[in-house]
Image (cartoon, rainbow, N blue to C red):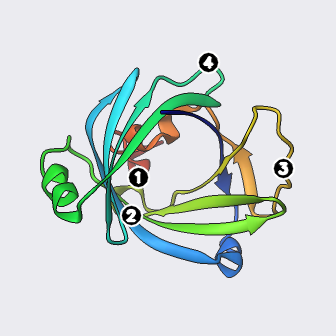
Amino acid sequence: MTVEIERKFLVNSNTFKDEAFRSYAIKQGFLNSHKDRTVRVRLKKDNGFITVKGKSSEDGLTRFEWEKNISTEEAENLLKLCEEGIIDKTRYEVKHGNHIFEIDEFFGENEGLIIAEIELQSENEFFEKPNWLGKEVTGDVKYYNSQLSKQPYKYWK
C-alpha cells in the first residue's frame, strides 16, 4: 500500500522518443472506474497486474495505490470482464535530470494523445522540465486512463 505523488503533462513533440531508454506496449482495462476508486487490469510486456487506486486529492497530486502481479493468462481473462473501452498505448521511459518520465502514446480511439507523467517523492519536489513537456494537466480528470476508456480523445471537441 502506497501513496502515489504524480504530475501529468501533455507532450508537444515526438523528440522524447529519441531520448527514451525503454519502450513497451501496454493494454489495460477497468473492472471498476468509479471516481472514488478504480480497479485496473494491465498487460505490460509479458507481465500482468491488478491495481486498485483511490480517490485523488483535491489538487490531483496524490492518491492511494495498491498493485499486485498476476499471470499473463489471468490478466488476459480479466481483460475480457472489463468495462467497455480498453486502453492501448506504448509507454516510453525517459531519464531527464534526476527523474524518469513515463510518456504514454495512445492508439485506437485515443490516438493523437500523448501524456507524460512523473512520480515525485514530495508534492513540492523540484524537477527539470524537458523541452517536449507541454501544458500541465495534473488533476484534470478527463486525462485519467479510466476516463479515456469511457470518453476517448477522438470524441473531444
The residue sitting at 61% across, 67% down in the picture is 93
Residue 23 is tagged as none
Q: Which of marks 2 and 1 is nearer the N terminus?
A: 2
Q: Distance between the residues labelled 4 and 2?
A: 28 Å
Q: Tell me the residue that label 2 is attached to.
A: 26
Residue 70 place in picture, x, y as percent? 27, 54
Q: Distance between the residues labelled 2 and 3?
A: 26 Å
User: Which mark is in front, 4 or 3?
Assistant: 3
Under mark 4, the amino acid is: Glu
Q: In which quarter of the image is residue 124?
A: top right
Under mark 1, the amino acid is: Lys
Residue 138 place in picture, x, y as percent? 64, 36
Q: Tell me the residue that label 3 is attached to.
A: 127
Under mark 2, the amino acid is: Ile
Q: Tell me the residue that label 1 is attached to.
A: 154
Question: 69 or 4: nearer the eye?
Answer: 69
Q: Distance between the residues labelled 2 and 1?
A: 19 Å
Q: Tell me the residue that label 4 is attached to.
A: 58
